[in-house]
Amino acid sequence: MAPTFIDPTSKSRNKAGLRKGHLRLVGTSPDSKRTATATRAKAGVSRPLLAKPARAELAQNLPHPDLPLDRILVGECIAQMNALPAESIDCIFADPPYNLQLSGELRRPNDSMVDAVDDDWDKFDSFSDYDAFSKAWLKAAQRLLKPNGTIWVIGSYHNIFRLGAQLQDLGFWMLNDVVWRKTNPMPNFRGKRFTNAHETLIWCAKSQDARGYTFNYDAMKVLNDDLQMRSDWLIPICSGGERLRGEDGAKAHPTQKPEALLHRVLVSSTKPGDVVLDPFFGSGTTGAVAKRLGRRFIGIERETRYAKAAERRISTVQPAAHDDVETMRSKKEEPRIPFGWVVERGLLQPGTVLFDQSRRHSAKVRADGSLTTRDASGSIHKMGAHVMGATACNGWTFWYFEVEGQLKPIDILRQKLRAETV
């Protein structure tokens, strides 16, 4: 489904369920699709890609019914954010104006012009004007975040330090700063300073007291060949076929971010079905990656030409299958399975003898899920510690059962029951 523009001129109620007197949908999708979307929104069901979570988690993941999901809102970001319901957004990715303060033309050694950022949206009269703008949109963003939501802000040396100060002054809690190191940065043509080869991302929780924010640690570790993901990311800039271009061959947007960067941001800090807001939508990279990964998105963009380019781009994106966008879960997130359930379900019978991996120790299963040895009885954990003379033991990984002469860890029975709970 292609995203739909929202025009801020109408006073009629729109089909995204927004308040009367706010926004009008200018449809780009067939009426049948828009009707189906409106019906789903009224029922409180988000259309794509909630990938088999537990029932309680599914209920918590349902988006706010008044959100214009998978839409591009055309207009000023602060006004548009202020019109959205409070505490309704899981994650915000913001790539605000850099305030580059460029003066004069920039040319390559062959005298060709560099396509630099010189648009009106990146121009401010003073640092104080830029700071006032930054504070206003960050306050609007803070209102929209759920208590456990997070925000990513990206910038260069021109603006990231001013943004960082604003984030702290407003009470956001910094979780990480991430250095995006570009493998193919633009050269420094004048030879007056170092090549600018990185940008900085600041990742924040809504407040210092925020709990339960999403960080998919295990997914990031798997993505990084089973090594902890570091805060320096080596990713190429957007180029080649990924770079959007107009009919004249020029860049459709001067600061288009690579999809690989947004892939890492969203996989690390969101879950399938989460709502991601990008208040400076530009060419729509956030929306394209969110759609592919089974997240819902809302884009805000003041320039109609960028919004149209983003719409065309996102309409060609095919979402991945539900199961394919799930990430590795940490052990703390997995449902707790008591060993007694294994016995109740008949996966192990009372009287079954369990062994450690070397067959040095053994214990017998009882009907209540406890184990008994010659001189003691208790849980799988206590009996594992008892036979080893240890203070603690993970019984799930210590004990094995026998199948046709082969020992199998009882943990595979726990995993079987876990799979049935989601």
Image (tube, grey):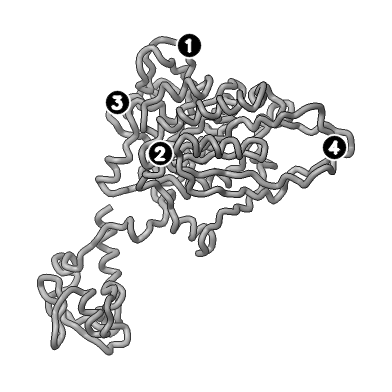
Residue type, numbered disc 2: Asp
User: Which comes before the other along the chain, label 3 or label 4?
Assistant: 3
Residue type, numbered disc 4: Arg
CB contact under 8 Å: marks 2 and 3: no
The percent position of residue 176, horizontal first and vertical second, equals: 51, 49
Residue type, numbered disc 3: Lys
The residue where tag 1 is placed is: 9
Answer with left or right where residue 74 lies relative to residue 212: right
Residue 402: name its quadrant: bottom left
The residue where tag 3 is placed is: 42
- The disc placed on residue 108 is 4
Above/below status of 42 relative to 182: above
Answer with left or right where residue 267 lies relative to residue 376: right
Q: Residues within 10 Å of mark 4 (few under 14, many from 20)?
A: few
Camera-side mark, 1 or 3: 1
Measured in 3D between alpha carbons, the distance from the residue under mark 2 to the one under mark 3, in whole angstroms, is 20 Å
- The disc placed on residue 90 is 2
Measured in 3D between alpha carbons, the distance from the residue under mark 2 to the one under mark 1, in whole angstroms, is 28 Å
Measured in 3D between alpha carbons, the distance from the residue under mark 1 to the one under mark 3, in whole angstroms, is 24 Å
User: Which comes before the other along the chain, label 1 or label 3?
Assistant: 1
Q: Secondary structure at mark 4?
A: loop
Q: Secondary structure at mark 1?
A: loop
The residue sitting at 46% across, 45% down in the picture is 320
Q: Residues within 10 Å of mark 2 (few under 14, many from 20)?
A: many
Residue 125 seen in this snapshot? yes
The percent position of residue 47, horizontal first and vertical second, equals: 36, 35
